[in-house]
Amino acid sequence: LHFQPAQTAEEAAKEASITKGPTEKITDEELALWRSQIEQLMADEKPWLDPELSLPDLAQRLQTNASVLSAVVNRAFGKNFNDFVNEYRVEAVKKRLNDPSAGHLSLLGIGLDCGFNSKSTFNRAFRKATGVAPSGWGRLKKYQA
């Protein structure tokens, strides 16, 4: 016989949520744990800076599968994976646009530095998140000041 060591409640909850399929219910407690882990990873490692970041890549970093991660992102953040990641990128772009030391960079250069992989994706995601094109952001900020 092979005995496994006792698990903590947190380890058991994480293991249970990892093994569940996306159509099975993830408890609110498990969802809160996942949300916290995802937010911590995004803040600490900034995986969104990688233009090639994919759902399976992020799932692997979180030691789960893409289906579970997709379901968690949809439920915990209310958006799909691409929109979720692109919002981090857009926030980084907005910060860079407000940084005088980035004044020599083009809008596209800043977008690419913040993880976008093309001009069209950058423009589409920025407009979706802010309601204006990246080129209009600076003018909008001046009028709000």
Image (cartoon, rainbow, N blue to C red):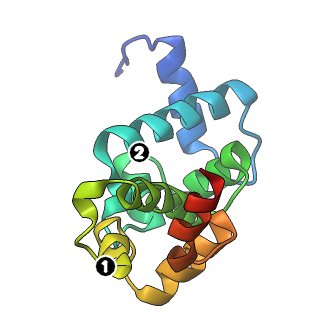
- Which image quarter holds the N terminus? top left
Q: Nearer the viewer, residue 125 or 35?
A: 125
Q: Label 1 sits on what residue type?
A: Ser
Question: Residue 36 vs residue 99: left or right?
Answer: right
Q: Which x, y percent locates residue 111? A: 38, 73
For the residues labelled 2 and 1, say whether their Cβ atoms are less than 8 Å apart: no
Q: Which of these two is toward me, 3 or 53?
A: 53
At x 28%, y 68%, the residue is 113
- Give the mark, 2 or 1, whose residue is nearer the N terminus: 2
Label 2 or label 1, whichever lies nearer to me, is 1
Residue drawn at the location 51% of the way across and 67% of the way down: 138
For label 2, the crowd category at 10 Å Cα-Cα, with few meaning under 14, some 14 to 19 and many 20 or more, is: some
In the figure, 15 relative to 118: above or below?
A: above
Judging by the rendered image, the residue that carries numbered circle 2 is 42
Residue at the image point whose x is 53% and y is 22% from the top: 12
Q: Which mark is residue 133?
A: none
